[in-house]
Image (spheres, rainbow, N blue to C red):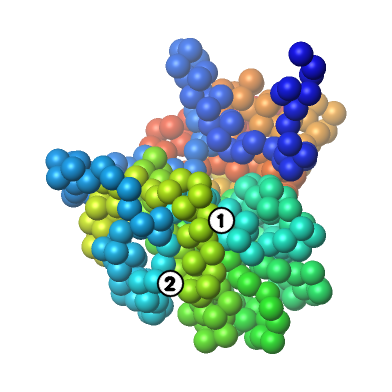
């Protein structure tokens, strides 16, 4: 038997597994082994899925809703998503302009596979969610990384300057993972004007849209202008807002031709998202932003608590996140002979302090580390104080 039996396909060359999921799994395994680890890696909250949503799933099971559905989702769910976009953001979509996927990740991957050809360029502003460049590569595209402004905000001029004859798409993420940055409305308008007349699509990942602080507002890119709406596929879902990461419910809305193409990929891959979960998703979409407000306030309080702890060490530089539930501190002042970058820093903190964080390098920024503040205050306090104490020994 030759060694070629287990060879990987060429499309996986240079593509890495998700570091956030890998490090979270490592931290959880260490905890299971009885080790004292503060796990600040996970991209999910510690809230429970709303009881009414769980009840809807159980009721759907009792009614025998365990068969296949339309690849795009049930008519009831697609209508509920369209109604939710209109109610929450003023975005008007017909049911046929909506598709439901196994999380935003699958939806974005389907969009790339449906629209990006070999050698097509996809502009990815940094810092970025770790999966964006890898998914572009898997779709045979070329990720074009655009540096941010000094405060990690979107540099619209740099994005527009990167548009060329092979540009197929721009990926937006506001609020941002990992920085929590929210793109101001005027900057969205500048980007929309700059793209007018082009054939560039926009994939707008707005999964953290409910999670904004200090009175910030994360306006959908598709709401900026009719031209923006015509070129944008808007992604959202229930994972972050409704504490439903494991349910795998994401949705996309946009031009009918693109949504139809994404549906072909769903039909030939997963077929549909779990059927009884679709009834639960309809129930979740009945909840309003006001229903979620206590959780948002709780997360804002935790963010402020963490910022206060970090303020005690001026060598750790921090941009105040306006959304999501991550901190992305610049720890490069502690780099040296023992720790030379974010990956080495993450290893050092796990081994020396028992604190699991995610290095910034996979997000496109090696000066930083990412940690989640969606943990209880006791865990956050222990983790951050240990982190600071360990870095002071460098």
Residue 255's spot in the image, x, y percent? 51, 75
**The C terminus is located in which quarter?**
top right
- At a point 30% along the width and 52% down the height, the residue shown is 278
Residue 146's spot in the image, x, y percent? 76, 62
Q: Residues within 10 Å of mark 1 (few under 14, many from 20)?
A: many
Work out whether residue 267 or residue 30 is closer to the camera in this orientation and state it: 267
Label disc, if present, on residue 286 of the rendered structure? none
**From what the image shows, is residue 134 above or below residue 24?**
below
Number of numbered tags placed on the structure image = 2
Residue 128's spot in the image, x, y percent? 65, 54
Residue with the most extreme right position:
337
> For residue 1, what is the image quadrant?
top right
Q: Is residue 374 visible?
A: no
- As helix, strand or loop, the secondary structure at mark 2 comes to helix
**From what the image shows, is residue 114 above or below residue 381?**
below
Work out whether residue 308 or residue 384 is closer to the camera in this orientation and state it: 384
Q: Is residue 364 visible?
A: yes
- At a point 68% along the width and 26% down the height, the residue shown is 347
Q: Disc 1 marks which residue?
A: 110
Residue with the most extreme front position:
1
- At a point 55% along the width and 35% down the height, the residue shown is 21
- At a point 60% along the width and 43% down the height, the residue shown is 370
- Looking at the image, residue 296 sits to the left or right of residue 7; the answer is left
Residues tagged 1 and 2 counted as in contact (Cβ below 8 A): no
> For residue 348, what is the image quadrant?
top right
Q: Residues within 10 Å of mark 2 (few under 14, many from 20)?
A: many
Residue 143's spot in the image, x, y percent? 75, 57
Cα separation between marks 1 and 2: 15 Å
- Looking at the image, residue 291 sits to the left or right of residue 366; the answer is left
Label disc, if present, on residue 97 of the rendered structure? 2
Whichever of labels 1 and 2 marks the residue nearer the N terminus, that label is 2
Work out whether residue 329 or residue 96 is closer to the camera in this orientation and state it: 96
């Amino acid at each position: 038997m030759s060694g070629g039996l287990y060879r990987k396909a060429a499309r996986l060359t240079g593509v890495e597994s998700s570091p956030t999921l890998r490090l979270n799994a490592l931290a959880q395994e260490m905890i299971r082994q009885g080790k004292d680890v503060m796990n600040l890696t996970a991209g999910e909250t510690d809230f429970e899925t709303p009881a009414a949503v769980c009840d809807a799933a159980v009721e759907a099971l009792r009614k025998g809703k365990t068969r296949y559905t339309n690849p795009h989702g049930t008519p009831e769910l697609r209508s509920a998503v369209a109604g939710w976009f209109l109610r929450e953001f003023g975005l008007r979509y017909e049911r046929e302009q909506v598709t439901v996927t196994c999380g935003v990740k699958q939806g974005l991957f389907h969009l790339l596979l449906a629209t990006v050809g070999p050698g097509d360029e996809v502009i990815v502003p940094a810092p970025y969610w770790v999966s964006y460049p890898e998914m572009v590569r898997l779709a045979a595209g070329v990720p074009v990384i655009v540096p941010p402004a000094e405060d990690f905000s979107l540099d619209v001029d740099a994005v527009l300057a990167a548009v060329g004859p092979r540009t197929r798409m721009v990926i937006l993420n506001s609020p941002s993972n990992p920085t929590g940055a929210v793109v101001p409305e005027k900057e969205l308008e500048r980007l929309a004007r700059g793209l007018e007349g082009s054939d560039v699509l926009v994939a707008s990942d707005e999964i953290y849209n409910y999670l904004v602080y200090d009175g910030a507002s994360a306006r959908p890119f598709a709401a900026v202008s009719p031209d923006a709406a015509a070129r944008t596929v808007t992604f959202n879902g229930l994972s972050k807002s409704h504490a439903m990461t494991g349910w795998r419910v994401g949705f996309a809305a946009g031009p009918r031709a693109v949504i139809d193409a994404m549906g072909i990929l769903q039909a030939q891959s997963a077929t549909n998202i779990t059927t009884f979960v679709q009834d639960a998703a309809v129930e979740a979409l009945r909840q309003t932003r006001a229903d979620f407000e206590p959780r948002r306030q709780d997360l804002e309080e935790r963010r402020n608590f963490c910022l206060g702890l970090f303020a005690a060490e001026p060598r750790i530089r921090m941009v105040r996140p306006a959304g999501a539930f991550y901190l992305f501190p610049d720890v490069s002042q502690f780099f040296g002979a023992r720790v030379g970058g974010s990956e080495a820093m993450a290893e050092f903190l796990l081994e020396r302090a028992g604190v699991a964080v995610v290095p910034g390098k996979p997000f496109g920024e090696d000066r930083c580390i990412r940690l989640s503040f969606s943990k209880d205050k006791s865990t956050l306090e222990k983790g951050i104080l240990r982190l600071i104490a360990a870095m002071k020994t460098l």
